[in-house]
Amino acid sequence: MTDALRTTVAGLDFSNPVLLASGTAGYGREVDGVIALDRLGGIVTKAVSPEPRHGNAAPRVWDFNGGMINAVGLANPGLQAVRAEALPWIAAHMQVARVFVNVVGRTIEDYAEVVAGLDDSAGVHAFELNVSCPNTRKGGLEFGADPEALGALVRGARSVTAKPLFVKLSPTLSDVVATTRVAIESGATGVTFFNTLPGLVIDTSTRRPVLGFGSGGVSGPALRPVAALAIRRVTQALPGVPVIGTGGVGTADHAVQLILAGASLVAVGTASMADPRAAERIVRDLARWCDAHGVARLADLRGTLEWPAS
């Protein structure tokens, strides 16, 4: 791959800035043979919790005109199975792409338990903490919406690893800059914008939700402008904080938009569900984009958006 796409983020070297977002590649093996994983910058694994989680009732995923809604319920085989089965496969089969392990939990302590349990596993380069999960000790409030809980969660994870920690935040936050500041001051390396947006799609013929769980997380093209604005605000207020931009990235142009806004890396989610090879295509098209626009190094475009004069 062209050197124009190479970048260094959080002390890690990436062959390009394109990742597969959590939930779209399983633990790598699930898409092996469909996409060449080592042609990507990296992947973010499916969620890992301390115990196995069976997830929500079907249907779990539904597409609609504006994108996709899902309520998978963070189904995963649990910490011990991922450590024993998934990560050895990753270490043996992924030599170039960087691997972020997505971590979830029901309590603050769950996050540190998972990170500590996987920290010495070969092939793991960083962790992504999904703090949009409800805090069961706080009446269902998302960890990311509670500064005290968020700080404690990040400090706990930081106490058991020296690897980069990215905190994945929700688009429903009232002050994304303040929340990012709490995460960084508590030991996070960077943030991921965004998780899905809560929503509801209704089947009018049955007068019931289309998803077995009822409500779900909305993703797809409509979230890209939301992510771009949040990335812009945070990187302007907190220069140097690395951001993984995700939300409606389906083309090279979409990826460049988030990089111009300030993203260091971009993650492809919903587009990969429609076309498993989307991320690989975006990498190729980014190289062509750089050639066509005379860009010697894509990373140099980070945060160079020209804002209108007031």
Image (cartoon, grey):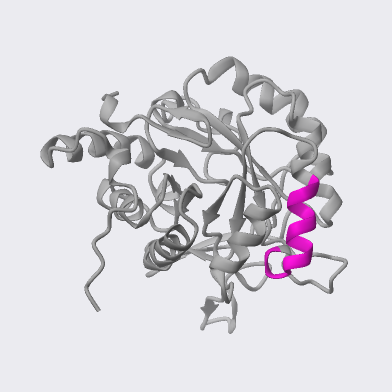
Q: Is residue 105 visible?
A: yes
Rendering coords of residue 25 (x, y %) = 53, 39
Please tell me in which quadrant of the rendered image residue 158 appears.
Answer: top right
Rendering coords of residue 276 (x, y %) = 41, 40
Rendering coords of residue 299 (x, y %) = 33, 39
Left or right relative to 53: residue 234: left
Number of marks present in the image shown: 0
In the picture, the quarter occupied by the N terminus is: top left
- Residue at (52% x, 31% y) in the render: 11
Instruction: Residue at the far top: name it.
Output: 92
Numbered range of the magenta stretch: 144-156
Q: Is residue 198 visible?
A: no
- Residue at (72% x, 59% y) in the render: 56
Left or right relative to 246: residue 55: right
Look at the magenta stretch and give its main secondary structure: helix
Rendering coords of residue 295 (x, y %) = 18, 38
